[in-house]
């Protein structure tokens, strides 16, 4: 959805809508932001998937990122910033974007501000940081049961959103895979990284007056309704 209105001279303008998402690993951001991307017709820019694509393509960036991802640590800020800047500069992001997985530290948030200032030089934009507030005690089980479709990106969970045919994507029939970092051991390290480096962004964005918090506990459909409320607000 593009917010539109009229300026003082009666000219119609469009305001670019920038949405970023915060929350611990497996809080449901990936599922909801993919849905939101279809609903708003804005690209879903997901750093984790962009990095996994680099690894699959055996690029230099992918080779460097792999060792950090395998340990559940953040990849270096310069690497991820370059990938995101390239992606957000593309034409399909000009009306808005849904940024999932970036920023993940205060340093990255400052980088995002710099790149937005550069990319958006002559346009108006609105910015919201949407935080998925969830009971973290359930998340490790969620992670180890997570499966995804390598072709269309659909996400499943063997415990509460199993595919209709075991091991196959409902949407495109492709064999589902499990992420290498979705093990109990790596998950623990991803949570430590989240609490140490990413969680401070909640206060960072609260202080800037752009934080919107949603209760991310419950069914996918319930969280979706709550998300739509804050997006359309
Ligand atoms: P995700 O798919 O969002 O769970 O991300 C998987 C992994 O990719 C993370 O555990 C990090 O190693 C890496 N990663 C994703 N986004 C970022 C980011 N913004 N900064 C640094 N590393 C990231």
Image (spheres, rainbow, N blue to C red):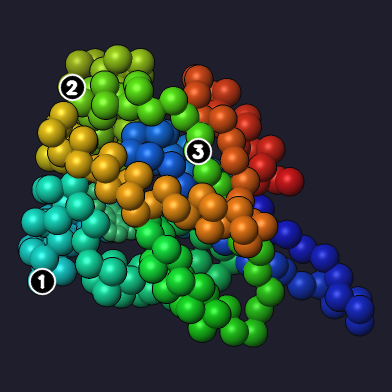
Q: Is residue 44 visible?
A: no
- Say whether marks 1 and 3 touch (CB < 8 Å): no
The residue carrying pointer 2 sits among few (fewer than 14), some (14 to 19) or many (20 or more) residues within 10 Å by Cα, namely some
- Residue beneath the point at 63% across and 32% down: 226
Which-is-in-front pick, marks 1 and 3? 3
Q: Secondary structure at mark 2?
A: loop
Q: Give how far across and how far down residue 91 sits, in percent.
A: 48, 73
Mark 3 to mark 2 CA distance (whole Å)? 28 Å
Q: Nearer the viewer, residue 192 or 176?
A: 192
Q: Nearer the viewer, residue 91 or 69?
A: 69
Along the horizontal axis of the image, is 167 left or right of 30?
left
Residue on which the image places disc 2: 167
Position above or below: 105 against 199 = below
Position above or below: 84 against 233 = below
- Residue beneath the point at 15% across and 69% down: 61
- Residue beneath the point at 50% across and 67% down: 93
Q: Secondary structure at mark 3?
A: strand
Mark 2 to mark 1 CA distance (whole Å)? 32 Å
Q: Which mark is residue 132?
A: 3
Mark 1 to mark 3 CA distance (whole Å)? 33 Å
The residue carrying pointer 1 sits among few (fewer than 14), some (14 to 19) or many (20 or more) residues within 10 Å by Cα, namely few
Q: Residue 155 falls in which quadrant of the image?
A: top left
Residue on which the image places disc 1: 60
Q: Which mark is residue 149?
A: none
Q: Earlier in the sequence, mark 2 or mark 1?
A: 1
Q: Give how far across and how far down residue 154 sits, in percent.
A: 33, 35
Q: Secondary structure at mark 1?
A: helix
């Amino acid at each position: 959805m593009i917010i539109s209105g009229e300026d003082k001279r009666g000219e119609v303008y469009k305001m670019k809508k920038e949405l970023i998402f915060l929350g611990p690993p497996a809080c449901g951001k990936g599922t909801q932001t993919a849905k939101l991307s279809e609903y708003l017709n804005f690209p879903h820019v997901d750093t984790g998937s962009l990095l996994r694509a680099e690894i699959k393509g055996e690029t230099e960036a992918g080779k460097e990122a792999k060792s950090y991802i395998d340990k559940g640590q953040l990849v270096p800020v310069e690497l991820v910033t370059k990938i995101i800047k390239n992606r957000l500069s593309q034409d399909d992001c000009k009306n808005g974007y849904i940024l999932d997985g970036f920023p993940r530290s205060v340093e990255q948030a400052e980088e995002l501000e710099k790149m937005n200032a550069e990319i958006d030089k002559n346009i108006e934009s609105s910015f919201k940081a949407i935080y998925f507030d969830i009971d973290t005690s359930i998340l490790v089980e969620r992670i180890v049961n997570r499966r995804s479709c390598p072709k269309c990106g659909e996400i499943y969970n063997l415990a509460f959103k199993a595919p209709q045919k075991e091991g196959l994507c409902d949407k495109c029939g492709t064999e589902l895979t499990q992420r290498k970092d979705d093990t109990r051991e790596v998950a623990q390290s991803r949570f430590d990284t989240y609490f140490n480096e990413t969680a401070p962004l909640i206060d960072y964005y609260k202080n800037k007056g752009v934080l919107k918090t949603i209760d991310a506990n419950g069914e996918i459909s319930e969280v979706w309704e709550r998300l739509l409320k804050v997006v359309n607000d």
